[in-house]
Amino acid sequence: MRGAQSRRRRAVTDASFHVTPRALSRVATILADEPATALRVSVEGGGCSGFQYRYDLVAGPDGDDLVIAGADATVVVDPVSLPFLAGAELDYVDDLMGQSFQIRNPNAQASCGCGTSFSLF
């Protein structure tokens, strides 16, 4: 039993992107009430710092997507966004300030207070 619990607590990782167990758990909860089967994490131009993170519920991965799957949750990242997220971690935070997905991105040189936009220098 102890080994099984230990495996369940581990984050799912790809060499280029990491998803914490908390994030996978929250994705699974959201997907349980949706017709979608995955959470897409992407990067697009815009926001107050130049780039912004985007989260979408989607029917499934596209052909070249990075797919990170946990027990009841799937997170996908498109190949265009992946270089911006190399080495980054998706987490889910529930604290006094509120609940949100947060990305800790070592590539971001600056970010805004909302945490959804960032810049690269």
Image (cartoon, grey):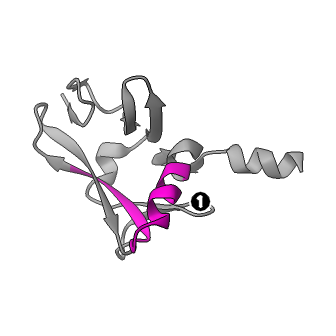
For the residue carrying disc 1, how many other residues have a C-alpha within 10 Å: few (<14), some (14-19), or many (20+)? many
Quarter placement of the C terminus = top left
Residue displayed at 85% across by 48% down? 3
Q: Position of residue 107 (x, y in %)?
A: 32, 33
Q: Give the residue pinned by disc 1.
A: 70
Residue displayed at 82% across by 52% down? 4
Is 54 placed above or below 70 here? above
Residue displayed at 44% across by 71% down? 37
Left or right of 96 in this view: 118: left
Q: Is residue 100 magenta?
A: no
Query: Circle 1 sits in a helix, a strand or a loop, which is it?
Result: loop
Type of the residue with mark 1: Gly
Q: Which residues are magenta?
A: 25-43
Left or right of 114 in this view: 2: right
Q: Position of residue 28 (x, y in %)?
A: 52, 59
> Can you see residue 14?
no
> Can you see residue 121?
yes
Among the 4 quarters of the image, the one containing residue 35: bottom left
